[in-house]
Image: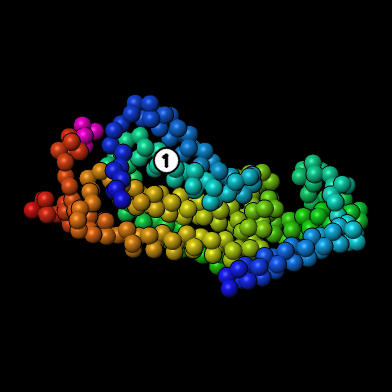
Amino acid sequence: MSKAKQAVAIISVIVVLLAAVYAVVFAYRNIPVTYDGADTNVVDLYNDPQSYDVSDPDGVADIIVKENLDKTMAVNNVSAVVFDWRGFDTLGESFILLTAIAGSFVILGIHRKKKNAGKEENKE
Amino acid sequence: MKFKQGITEKNIIVKCSADKILPFSLVFGIYIILFGTISPGGGFQGGVITASAVLLLYIGYGYSTASAAVKQEVLRVCEPLGATLYVILGLCGIVLGSVFCRNVFFNDGKIGDLVSAGNITFMGWTVGFKVLTGIGFLILLMLGLLAPEFKKTKDPDYELMVDEEDEEEGGDE
């Protein structure tokens, strides 16, 4: 029974892996590369992002960078994405930390209560 | 399972290296928080680096000194305060006629200044403040279980064990 289950599991894993390998090879051979970043001048883009030439058809990333800086009026693209476009994401991350600390405070609060109670008893 | 005792012996090498590294970690973490919006880094990373000062204090001087130097109650109050400030700064976008977390105060300073990215700068600072206080409070909470004056007995709860050595060490410091 267990051997049959193991055999089924192994066969299914092998089939999924073969399908994944086939998909990767198919994508690598047939799907054309639209942007490889070969013509992007990073130094010019960093020094003067507002007036960078985006007429090049290979410069999709440049258009994205320029539109991003135009819309958010930020300086750094990463901080613009983190705090403006994905502000809810940052909010959720910080609230995850808040929840974790609240939970650990509830669990480890026994220790704090014991400590305070002991001190009061000693003082009395 | 043995209940691990906290750090009581103060090795001179560990103490000196904690002395040397602690101001650098404080300054470097606060620098990363302040310049997080215009350079690599950010609030989370700088907050964790700054909170490592608490761990350095514990490694060098033990739990009593660390808990005396860093007030737990202040950290406990300041952490939700940082989260509230972040929400208020996010609501500024709604108040000024746009969506949540919109960058509003953007016409200040040149590119590369400390306050040049508008609302994003202040939001990064609040996140850094929140992570700093939160991680510091978490470290102090967890190190409190390793405090040397507590010892596990047959009861499930911890009982207070006041040794004479600890009192003497506290008096010397």
First to last magenta residue range: B169-173
Residues B160 and B60: in front is: B160
Residues B96 and B151: in front is: B151
Q: Which residue is drawn at 61% across and 71% down?
A: A5
Question: Residue B63: horizontal and vertical position, in percent?
Answer: 30, 42
Task: From the image, tell me which residue sits under label 1.
Answer: B53
Compared across the picture, whether B82 is left or right of A107 comes to right
Q: Residue at x 25, y 43 (%)?
A: B148
Q: Residue at x 36, y 56 (%)?
A: B76
Compared across the picture, whether B162 is left or right of B99 comes to left
Q: Residue at x 28, y 46 (%)?
A: B147
Numbered disc total: 1
The kind of secondary structure element at disc 1 is helix
Instruction: Write down the chain letter for disc 1.
Output: B
Alpha-carbon neighbours of circle 1 within 10 Å: few (<14), some, or many (≥20)?
Answer: many
Question: Residue B93: horizontal and vertical position, in percent?
Answer: 60, 66
Question: Residue B121: horizontal and vertical position, in percent?
Answer: 58, 52
On screen, residue B170 above or below B142: above
Task: Say if residue B18 shows up in the picture.
Answer: yes
Q: Which amino acid does label 1 sit on?
A: Ala
| Majority secondary structure in the magenta region | helix
Residues A56 and A32: in front is: A32
On screen, residue B28 above or below A89: above
On screen, residue B20 above or below A25: above
